[in-house]
Image (cartoon, rainbow, N blue to C red):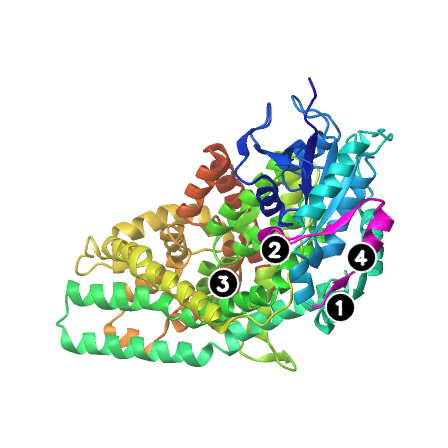
Amino acid sequence: MTTIPLVALVGNPNAGKSALFNALTGARQKVGNYPGVTVERHAGRLALEDGRPVELIDLPGAYSLDPSSPDEAVTRDVVIGKQEGERLPDALIVVVDAANLENHLRFALQLAELGLPMVVALNMIDLATRDGLEIDPEILSRELGVPVIPTVAVRKRGMAELKAAVGEAVAQGNLRKIEPGRGDGDEYDTILDTRRARDLARRAILSEAPGRQWTRRIDRILLHPVIGLVVLLALLFLIFQAVFAWATPMMDGIEAAQGWIAGGVDAGLPDGFAKSLLIDGVINGVGSVIVFLPQILILFFFILLLEGTGYMTRAAFLMDRMMSRFGLSGSSFIPLLSSFACAIPGIMATRTIADPKDRLTTILIAPLMTCSARLPVYTIIIGAFIANDTVGPGIGRQGLVLFGLYVAGVIGAMLAALVLRRTVAKGAAASFIMEMPKYQLPSLRDLLIGLWQRGYIFLRRAGTIIFATTIVLWVLLSFPQVPEGSTMTQSEYSAAGRVAKGLNVVMAPIGFNEEISLALIPAMAAREVAVSALATTYSIDESDEAQAEQSLSQRLQARWSLPTALAFLAWFVFAPQCLSTIAVTRRETNSWRWPGFMLLYLFALAYAAAGITYWTATAAGL
């Protein structure tokens, strides 16, 4: 009985393999799993030009024969003949994206060294032509030593030529000879393979549009290991300067509106619980958080802008080298970057990380990224205790401190990753390969939609979680009522005050007062609640006239020392995230072990950081 030849379809992710597989096999397909591996297996029947049948298998996308995921391991094992229950292919069809020739040729060169009969499908040639690329397939064919066929899989262009080349490759027979150290699991020289692919791509590309040339020139700067890092830090510094400088007029307007509404309620309602609830709980409590909406929008404007231009992917690539020193790879950068918005989507984004230890480490350090919920906390303390002056041309002191807090969070996360990778998540850093998108002007519509979504999420939290938590706190601060003639204030006599007094036994050594200790409890629901909790607590003991005369910043200045304020900032750099983050960590790790571990180590870090900051500032006489 004659065995039907087996041909494997191989290539990088997004090279158009699936479209080519469908074009070659039509409806003659079946789907299953590779033996012993839960990786999907697509197989189909291909009829050559002379009618001979060929069994075609579509292998998972891979960047290298050094696997960094189960998918890539399957591809490697099939093409070297080590996949259980799978025979060695008689030939390979290597799919290469013509518009990303340099990146895709690296894998093609590795496959060519295996010695299997091979055909290269230079796919999406129409898109490359549209982008101004003129590629000579003959040069590629001569250098690789295999046929190179231009194809457009989605339009079935080049299929006849490809089938003819496959027929010739199958007729050669399998002449493969395994070379020691190549294809048997040893590491490939990534730098050498990249250089070979770059040189071959340059020879094969006869001409290209000026836009692609400018992209390479810009990348030489932005991806430079030193200059690129300086540019990235400069951009981040600019963002945090703008968060303070640009938002001030809008924040002043919201505060004025808040005061006007509070004045109207004060004049229109008699003294009593209803008036206290509206002014102390809702207006001063929730309103003290809403005032930071302009800063949230400015921060996300820059993030969306960098994403839309294609720079964010380059920032991930740039950070890969640094992150590898701490046991992580550039694949962790995007989830960690997402955590600057909120740790919840950041933790969920770790699903794209193939290495389980790398993924676990990224989940555990994601709360150390300074999420947008911390911004109101930072802003109120910085505004109250850091002078609004400049330390250089265009460099505001308040923006500089905010930038420093974000940097402290990043440094803390990297050091935590280093410890975790050497202890509970021990393992080597995974490899990281990604394609660079084209530079482009971001869509104004996409920017506006993104800002609307972030603003809506922030206001929804203010109207739900923050509102509910603030009302509960107001009730606990209002009851029981302090007896007439008592020397205690209402906040001290209340149920919340008694809880704060007990908790402050633990928190007093690091400089925290009872009001801070109390604010930390509802802040576990949402970080912004710390601000509304402080506003509500200080409002309870003051008359309506005093509240109208003093802002929260002024109240903090009157009651806190500078070392206490700095310790409070240090606490929030490392403090555990909200309960929703803990719940998502439980879901993503399928265990309560890791959320519990996260809580313990973050609380320990926060306490140590706040204590060291307070004791150092006190000793320095600040």
Q: Is residue 152 magenta?
A: yes
> Rounded to the nearest whole Å, what is the CA distance between mark 2 and mark 3?
21 Å
Q: Amino acid at mark 2?
A: Val
* Magenta span: 132-157
User: Callout 4: 10 Å neighbours few (<14), some, many (20+)?
Assistant: many
- Look at mark 4 in the image and give the residue it sits on: 201
Q: Nearer the viewer, residue 507 or 282?
A: 282
Q: Amino acid at mark 1?
A: Glu
Q: Which mark is residue 565?
A: 3
> In this view of the protein, can residue 488 be seen by the observer?
no
Question: Residue 497: horizontal and vertical position, in percent?
Answer: 30, 53
Which residue is painted at 64% across and 42% down in the image?
61
Q: Which mark is residue 95?
A: none
Q: Which mark is residue 208?
A: 1
Q: What element does badge 4 sit on?
A: helix
N-term-proximal mark, 2 vs 4: 4
> Rounded to the nearest whole Å, what is the CA distance between mark 4 and mark 1?
12 Å
- Look at mark 2 in the image and give the residue it sits on: 410
User: Callout 3: 10 Å neighbours few (<14), some, many (20+)?
Assistant: many
Give the number of the mark in front: 3 or 4.
4
Q: How many marks?
A: 4
